[in-house]
Each structure stands twice: as structure tokens, then as C-alpha cells.
Image (cartoon, helix red, strand yellow):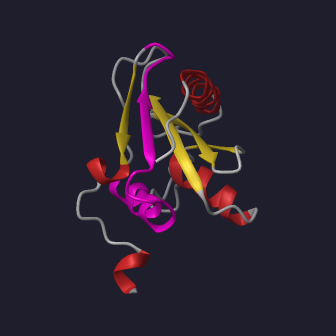
Amino acid sequence: MRQLEEKEIKELIETALTQRNFSYAPYSQFRVGAALLAKNNQIFTGCNVENAAYSPGNCAERTAFFKAVSEGVREFDAICVVGGKEEKLTDFAAPCGVCRQVMMEFCEPDFTIILATDTENFQCFSLKELLPMGFGPKNLD
């Protein structure tokens, strides 16, 4: 796992917070933003997009991953996720199980997941911590 610099972490947090503003969440009002750092230093962004039929919606994390993959990028160092109902975030918003599984598809177990409420309040986790005993492509080797 590449050790992220504080400047990189803060940039990812700020980017995720900005992306949260683009969220389309008329049903839950739970707005989420994500900033995904590729190994080539590109940042891919995402926000959650809800749907009246519920299941066609997409999470911010998967939006960022799918944008990256659709542009040919498949190696990643970290993702930052911010989310909540209120304008001022008070708690961390961890990725759902489906998003963790998508991360497992493209990332190593030591991939960094940053959960934040602002640039001063954040915690870093590894994918292995948030998805212990995860099943991924290496299980099929």
C-alpha cells in the first residue's frame, strides 16, 4: 500500500465533498460524494444517483470506479467517501457491501478507504479491514 501524504488525503476529501453537491437523492436525502485516486494519480469522482424504482440507483463509490474503468484505468491507491443527510456532516459514511465488493474486484486488500466529515476529521481503513475474508479475482486463480 502506498502511504498517502496529508496533502493528498485533504485533496481527496475536498473533492469528495464537492462531488456530494452533485448527488441526486430526492428520496433518501442522503447525499454521498467520492473521490477515487488511481495509481497514475488521476482522480475519478462520483456521487450517488437515486431512482424512483430504487434498484436502478448507483452509489458514489461505484460511480467513480465505473468512470475510471470505462476510461481504461484499473489500478487504484485510495478512495475518499463522504456522506450524510445534513449539510454539516457529523458521522462517517462507510461504503455499502456492494461497493466493497466492487473495490475487491479492482483493488488489493491494502487499498486505502478514507472516511471523512471534513478535512480535519477523517479515518483511513484498508479494504481488508472493511471487507475481511473478501472474495475477489485471486480466489478464482
Give the quarter of the figure containing the C terminus: bottom left
Residue 98 at what x, y percent from top left?
A: 39, 60
Decide if residue 132 is on the left or right side of residue 116. left
Decide if residue 20 is on the left or right side of residue 131. right
Residue 61 at what x, y percent from top left?
A: 52, 48
Residue 103 at what x, y percent from top left?
A: 46, 58
**82 above or below 87?**
below
Name the residue furthest right.
71
- Asked if the magenta segment contains residue 5, the reply would be no
Foreground: 94 or 12?
Answer: 12
Rendered residue at 71%/65% (across/down): 70
Residue 127 visible in the picture: yes
Rendered residue at 38%/72% (across/down): 136
- Asked if the magenta segment contains residue 108, the reply would be yes
Magenta-colored span: 96-120
Q: In terms of image quadrants, where is residue 74?
A: bottom right
Rendered residue at 59%/44% (across/down): 36
**9 above or below 104?**
above
Residue 120 at what x, y percent from top left?
A: 46, 13
Q: Total label count?
A: 0
Foreground: 141 or 115?
Answer: 141
Q: In terms of image quadrants, where is residue 17?
A: top right
Residue 28 visible in the picture: no
Foreground: 113 or 16?
Answer: 113
Decide if residue 83 is on the left or right side of residue 131. right
Name the residue furthest bottom.
141
Rendered residue at 43%/21% (across/down): 117
